[in-house]
Amino acid sequence: MTMLDDRTTAAATWPAAYPQGYAVVDVETTGLARDDRIISAAVYRLDAQGNVEDHWYTLVNPERDPGPVWIHGLTTDVLAGAPLFPDIAGEFAERLDGRVLVAHNAIFDWQMIAREYARAKSAAPVRQRLCTIALSKELALPLPNHKLESLAAHYGVVQQRAHHALDDARVLAEAFRPSLHQAARVGARLPLLECRPLTEWSDGPATPRIGYQATGPYGRSSSWRPARKRPACPYPNPGRYEADKPLKQGMRVAFSGDTSIDRDLLEDRATEAGLHVASSVSRLTSLLVTNDPDSATSKTVKAKAFGTPVIDEAAFTQLLRDVAPADG
């Protein structure tokens, strides 16, 4: 069979309901909160079968502190001469137009992109997104965790520069293609979700950060959130967190008070790392995360009574970057 015949056969058997093109995206940012900014972006455009068509990369001047330089390596000096987001918005949009946005933890990348376009008084031409974490779960891939490096290792993809947008996008594109083919072979659905562009945007100050307390119209804390059911944690509880040691999969983590990062996003990241997000504090709780440990909330009071370790949001997000695997 010739290559042309092989491609013809693949096109004939490819699920008709699958999208006709993808934009594999990675963005590096100044942080994880609503007012954080994109500092670099990369896009690999793929055809319907996941083959690379081209790729694109740019730095972006965030007009503010670049955030965790020790992670992404992009200093203020490096970014000083980079274009502003409105300057690259058009070219970025051309790369996304008519394609499904693919990313690892896609809700984060999409929200950051949508906010940047809203600031630029525009909208990204994206209607659907696909999260490769959700796809790996749909395919029941035998991964130790949901980190990009684990997905890459599963498919034998070599990562050269972690947290560099272009290399992360390349790694994800190479890992997405076999995932896409496996989904087609077994007739699995693609976990596509709708992308809704922001139509309004109020750009608040970049500070304060950790410890920021949102308030309602009468000065009261407005931290009420509707209950959200999450999947059961598959790992046993290894016990309490110990200072100067990593978090371990299965640990029960509770949150109290307001956080600078959107709470749902913070809890999603904890769940994806293999932690058990608990809605209350008990003797089994491994850790309480709060920016106001002296408050008299029921969780902080119980944590003190039970001797539960307490850390702030900044320390927790640092620990989330390297969660140890569950025992055995």
Image: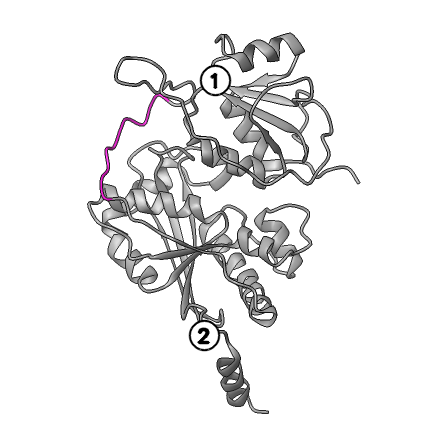
Of the pair 62 and 253, the residue shown nearer to us: 253
* Magenta extent: 199-208
Residue 295 place in picture, x, y as percent: 48, 9
Question: Which residue is depicted at the point 45% across and 50% down?
Answer: 165
Instruction: Judge left or right: residue 26 versus residue 242.
Output: left
Instruction: Give the image's coloring scheme.
Output: one colour
Secondary structure of the residue carrying numbered label 1: loop
Work out which quarter of the rendered image holds the C terminus and state it.
top right
Work out which quarter of the rendered image holds the N terminus and state it.
bottom right
Is 201 in the magenta? yes
Residue 193 place in picture, x, y as percent: 42, 54
Mark 2 / mark 1, whichever is N-terminal = 2
Question: Which residue is depicted at the point 31% across and 40% down?
Answer: 80
What kind of secondary structure does the magenta stretch mostly adopt? Answer: loop
Residue at the outermost right position: 328
Of the pair 97 and 235, the residue shown nearer to us: 235
173 over 268 or under it: above or below:
below
The circle drawn on residue 16 is 2
